[in-house]
Image (cartoon, rainbow, N blue to C red):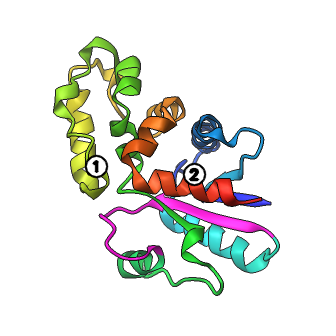
Amino acid sequence: MVTLYVEGGGDTADLRSRCRAGFSRLLKTSGLAGRLPRIVAGGSRNKAFDLFRSAHEQRPGDIALLLVDSEDPITRTPWEHLLARDGWKRPAGATDERVHFMATCLETSLVTDRSALRRHFGSDFNERALPPVQNLEERSRGAVLACLDQATTRCNAGRRYSKGAVSFALLGSLDPNVLKGHLAYFQRLIETLNQLP
């Protein structure tokens, strides 16, 4: 069994369900329908790592994968990045292919698909507030979030961007071909999942 432990979903059952649904829809449209991994919404990044580590160590016959925000631009191998940033030590036998990133955060994926954002936020969406799609994974988490906030500032209060239900609804509406064309770490995740049994 392949299980993908993802950062996200907060502390409520409703948000964890929405998180799983958003990732499931995105992976299905990425060509994985019929062979989706089991998706576990871990809540915080630390909790997602703990769940991944436990599964990796206690169920060696299964394939556990971790998907977390990189938080910072990535300049090292996956496990080196996590050790330097979070102090997370690589569990024995966990290769770099077991770790995947939303670089630098989930919102990087959202900002990449401008058509999905226009459909969701409507005519008050200010696309000019967003950075160019080139090299988005090299932008800081804070910069990506600030641009998305600015782009939705004219939307009424119920339509502005917010983490949680809005982010997971958007996630499920993204075009994976757009993401693959601009986000190397998304492409890496899909390639890894395609190579698994």
Picture coordinates of residue 146, whole percent (x, y):
22, 43
Q: Looking at the image, which residue is at 36% across and 45% down?
A: 182
Q: In screen coordinates, is 60 left or right of 123?
A: right
Disc 1 marks which residue?
Answer: 136
Which residue is situated farthest in the left direction here? 128
Q: In screen coordinates, is 98 left or right of 34?
A: left
Picture coordinates of residue 78, whole percent (x, y):
45, 73
- Placement of 92 over or under 132, stated as above or below: below
Q: Looking at the image, which residue is at 26% across and 21% down?
A: 125
| Mark 1 or 2, nearer chain start | 1
Disc 2 marks which residue?
Answer: 190
| SS for callout 2 | helix
Residue 135 appears in the figure: yes
Q: Residues within 10 Å of mark 2 (few under 14, many from 20)?
A: some
Picture coordinates of residue 123, whole percent (x, y):
28, 12
Q: Amino acid at mark 2?
A: Ile
Point out the stretch of residues depicted in magenta: 62-78
Picture quarter with the C terminus: bottom right
Quarter occupied by residue 23: top right
Which residue is situated farthest in the top direction here? 123
